[in-house]
Amino acid sequence: MRLRGVGRRYGLGGPWVLRGVDLEVPPGSLTRVQGRNGSGKSTLLRLLAGIDAPSAGRITGRPPTAYVPERFPAELPFSALGYLTHLGRIHGLSRAAAARGAGEWLERFGADGYAGTPLAELSKGTSQKIAVAQALLAAPGLLVLDEAWTGLDQAARGVLDTAVAERVADGGAVVFVDHDPRRLAGVPDRVLRVTETRLEPVDGTVRPSVTRDGPGAGPRVRVEAEGRPGAGPPGALSGAVVREYGPAPTPVDGGGDDGPAGRGRGRGRGVRLTVEVGVADSDGLLRTLLTADPPWHIRAVTAVDDNDPQEPAQGAKEKA
């Protein structure tokens, strides 16, 4: 997807909110957009999502796109399940696939108990879960998130973090705005700032071409995952270092067989895996974990602090 000379203003004589924006959004990329309030971040996201048309310039190559707005239209006359099924149909899914996907995402976000509740009767937090779920239903080629984590509880924020990692690992592009600077810190391929109608890269945040002086050199990310009982570590991946591989801790706070990591695996403790890998290889690692049979559940993806060195897990480095 490409933006060339894109500008946006409201009204023929209104001031420019954005002007001269040139941007490429490649498949499998994660982009954070930041800027002060009123700088035009949401305007940029609406242009990317196709909600607004540019006042100048061209946007080409937009893939199937899903958008999570800053505000959710809770007044719509649907139940939670009915709304998600309806949106799935709009995204091109069959009725059966839309209903199945709606149920799965309601379950992942812990909102399956509200499937039959009218949207107008949902709490703000549950409404936000529905807003996020509708964007994830059809596995879009471009996922646009405008403060999508706001209003979610901690568990749901973790589910969305994982969903973003899954989209990118599967070749989708994700562009997001979030007020919390720690959100997915160190994971995006680049961070862009909207300032004075312009879009500029934040210094030091665009990933350079991969060059290594040795295994593990350069920026790294830590991937924490959980597998079914007896699951083996992922296959060979250059530069990967396993920090932890062993039984998962005793489930707490709903994280057992009924939690996201345990659904469908049956009784018994699973396997906890923590792997560090160069940023250039992180998508490959996530893809390996998510496409395993059975797939691993991604619990967290974070930047590695090189000032906090750790020793590899005993005997695990060779397995990775």
Image (spheres, rainbow, N blue to C red):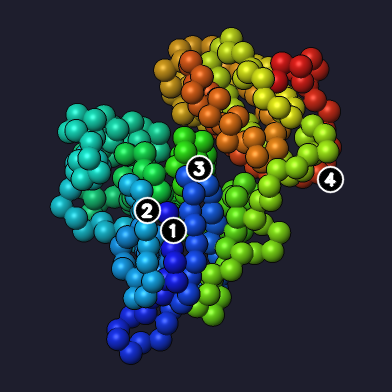
Find disc 2 in the rendering and name its residue.
Answer: 61
Query: Residue drawn at (54%, 54%), measured in percent from left and top?
Result: 31
State the image coordinates of residue 208 (x, y, percent, origin top left). 69, 51
Task: Compare marks 4 and 2 and give the one earlier in the sequence.
Answer: 2
Please state which of the two labelled residues, at mark 1 or mark 3, is closer to the viewer. Answer: 1
Find disc 1 in the rendering and name its residue.
Answer: 2
272 left or right of 165?
right
Please state which of the two labelled residues, at mark 2 or mark 3, is closer to the viewer. Answer: 2
Find disc 4 in the rendering and name its residue.
Answer: 307
Report which quarter residue 54 is drawn in.
Answer: bottom left
Look at the picture and state if 128 lies above or below 107.
below
Asked if disc 4 and disc 3 are in contact, CB closer than 8 Å, the reply is no
69 left or right of 154?
left
Q: How far apart, in angstroms, are the residues tagged by discs 2 and 3? A: 15 Å
Find disc 3 in the rendering and name its residue.
Answer: 28
Task: Compare marks 1 and 3 and give the one earlier in the sequence.
Answer: 1
Amino acid type of the residue that numbered disc 4 sits on in the rendered structure: Asn
Query: Residue drawn at (65%, 39%), measured in percent from left and top?
Result: 280
SS at circle 4? loop
Q: How far apart, in angstroms, are the residues tagged by discs 1 and 4? A: 38 Å
User: Viewer-proximal residue, 94 or 81?
Assistant: 94
